Amino acid sequence: MSPALRVGDRVLVSPIPYRFRAPEVGEVAVFRTLGAPQGWGIPRTKRVVAGPGEAIRIQAEEGTERYLLYIDGHPIREPYVHGVMAYELGAHGEVPPGFELARDGLRIPHDCYLLLGDNRNVSVDSHVFGPVPRPALQAKVLAVYWPPQRAGLVRDAERELAP
């Protein structure tokens, strides 16, 4: 999640928002992946990038080596992403587990979310394990409290269309 969160950061989280409303795009959330031997896996922290019913794809911009996230066919500007993405998802008709094929890429199933790390190329996130079911989302990340020099609010990101 670098640069928003770094290894060793201690964060303040709250489960209260997700008890009364759905997660919102741009929020940083704590969730657990499915598939661990005891059911839920280790807690992870990633950004909510897309929600139920949205079609997503990550594809190289024509004529460049720059990869963009597209949601419902529109390129998305992501100023919080560290570095340049170096992978594609849903760009060539492949359907990874958990997704549904859509005209504009991959559709996120009902009651699931796409969560991606801000440091995309080294992040183990939805591009690896698929959409995250709503019950797996446990809390919203509110702030970093340790180390003291990094203390502050964790800002949500607004979805912006790329130029």
Image (cartoon, helix red, strand yellow):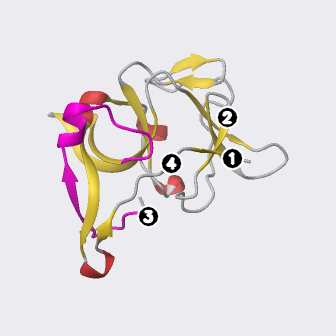
SS at badge 1: loop
Choose mark 3 or mark 2, whichever is in front: 2
Residue 30 at what x, y percent from top left?
27, 47
SS at badge 2: strand
Of 142 and 49, nearer the camera is: 142
Residue 73, labelled with which disc? none
Mark 3 / mark 2, whichever is N-terminal: 3
Residue 100 at what x, y percent from top left?
51, 18
The residue singled out by tag 4 in the image is 158
Q: Residue furthest bottom?
A: 149
Q: Are marks 1 and 2 in contact (CB under 8 Å)?
A: yes
Q: Amino acid at mark 2?
A: His
Calculate the distance from the C-alpha at mark 3 to the C-alpha at mark 2. Answer: 25 Å
Q: Amino acid at mark 3?
A: Ser
Answer with the quarter of the image where residue 88 lies.
top right
The residue singled out by tag 3 in the image is 2
> Callout 4 environment at 10 Å: few (<14), some (14 to 19), or many (20+)?
some
Mark 4 / mark 3, whichever is N-terminal: 3
Calculate the distance from the C-alpha at mark 1 to the C-alpha at mark 2. Answer: 8 Å
Q: Is residue 112 left or right of residue 74?
A: left
Q: Residue at position x 44%, y 30% from top?
A: 51
Q: Residue furthest right?
A: 63
Q: Amino acid at mark 1?
A: Ala
Q: Magenta includes 160?
A: no
Mark 1 / mark 3, whichever is N-terminal: 3
The residue singled out by tag 1 in the image is 162
Query: Which region of the structure is painted magenta?
Result: 4-27
Calculate the distance from the C-alpha at mark 1 to the C-alpha at mark 3. Answer: 22 Å
Mark 1 / mark 2, whichever is N-terminal: 2
Above or below residue 56? Residue 141 is below
Residue 74, labelled with which disc? 2
Calculate the distance from the C-alpha at mark 1 to the C-alpha at mark 4. Answer: 12 Å
